[in-house]
Image: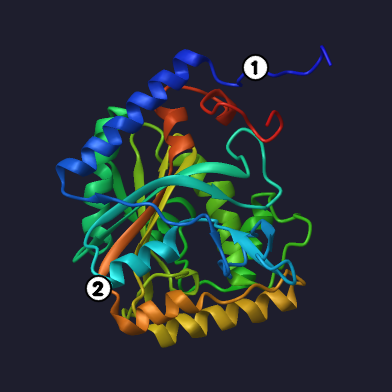
Amino acid sequence: MHDITWQPTAALETLRLRAELIAKIRHFFQLRGVLEVETPLLSHATVTDLHLQSFTSTYQLANGTAKETLYLQTSPEFAMKRLLAAGSGPIFQICKAFRNNGESGRWHNPEFTMMEWYRPGFNHHDLMDEMDALLQEILKVEPAERFSYAALFEKYLNINPHSSTAAELNAIAQQCNIAEIPHFDKNNKDNGLFLLMSHIIEPQIGQTTPIFIYDFPASQAALAKIRADNPPVAERFEVYYQGIELANGFHELTDAAEQRDRFINDLALRKKLNYPSVPIDEHLLASLSHGLPDCAGVALGIDRLMMLALNKKNIGDVVSFTINTA
């Protein structure tokens, strides 16, 4: 028993500084008239995203005759969109999120703190402006750089990511000695793009100032609107700084029928990959059918932001306890 490590992983002074920074974040949004909200962490449904796996919990009904499976939420997005559809106006939330992806280490913990905010009347460029202002205030950095997804691939790899084929992307990966990855589907173009982005481009960007990457391939739209350019692009962005992915933002999809189609397509792919099937969130779809205002939203990893703001190298240095010590 004497060998058990019970002390917090972060220094108490770090936790005090973390609290001060989170108070600054709240003040940032209060000055802008953005309402702080709380939504449930447990839900009857969860995300269908192939890259996200959810924790489950068994709920014993009051009469003791039945049980229900509930899901710890990977983000508060679906419930916050229901508030938006009900007329909440601009909202933000700082909360726990949970992802059962088997990731824990320097950048990851299965339980982490996330901030999401939504701005009716904003597109993804408007939200990048506000995110940039927040990062300048919290991280004390210069204004961020901005590149389209296509411009980054052309700058660092001299290819057009929209028109390149899976075979061409695989050939580049082989030239860069990054092609031999277990279970990697070389015939999937998006896999090739992810591989080149993570191994070649990400290590070279956002080192001195944050960088926004926007207008992703339509195949990577997730919950974003698709703009009918030639080729079509997903109106979403990601934010990187010093090798860390900080945030993921969207000009939000508001079409309930299209959202249902995307969920159904996700479930078909999950079945093909032998991933657990999950229920579609019908509450979200009903709120979209009622009418989600045109808006943009973004999810920001608070723990990673704290690592950067406080010059720490490990997520355990900015949280009270990690999964290994909880």
Assign the N terminus to one quadrant of the image.
top right
Q: Earlier in the sequence, mark 1 or mark 2?
A: 1
Q: Position of residue 160 (x, y in %)?
A: 44, 66
* Residue 169 position (above or below residue 314): below
Query: Does residue 235 show up?
Result: no
Which residue is found at the position 69% from the left and 19% from the top?
A: 6
Q: Position of residue 37 (x, y in %)?
A: 33, 52
Q: Position of residue 263 (x, y in %)?
A: 54, 78
Q: Residue furthest front?
A: 63
Provide the secondary structure element on which disc 1 rests.
loop
Which residue is found at the position 71% from the left and 56% from the top?
A: 179
User: Mark 2 — residue?
Assistant: 293
* Residue 18 position (above or below residue 207): above
Q: Nearer the viewer, residue 65 or 196?
A: 65
Mark 2 Cα-neighbour bin, 10 Å: few <14, some 14–19, many ≥20:
many
Assign the C terminus to one quadrant of the image.
top right
How is the structure coloured here?
Answer: rainbow
* Residue 87 position (above or below residue 27): below
Provide the secondary structure element on which disc 2 rests.
loop
Which residue is found at the position 46% from the left and 58% from the top?
A: 158
The three-letter amino acid code for the residue at tag 2 is: Pro
Q: Is 42 left, or right, of 234 in this rendering?
A: right
* Residue 242 position (above or below residue 256): above
Q: Nearer the viewer, residue 295 or 30?
A: 30
Which residue is found at the position 58% from the left and 37% from the top?
A: 107
The label shown at residue 7 is: 1
Tell me if label 1 and label 2 are in contact, CB under 8 Å.
Answer: no
**Residues under labels 1 and 2: Cα distance?**
46 Å
Q: Is 58 left, or right, of 17 in this rendering?
A: right
The three-letter amino acid code for the residue at tag 1 is: Gln
The label shown at residue 158 is: none
Q: Position of residue 57 (x, y in %)?
A: 68, 58
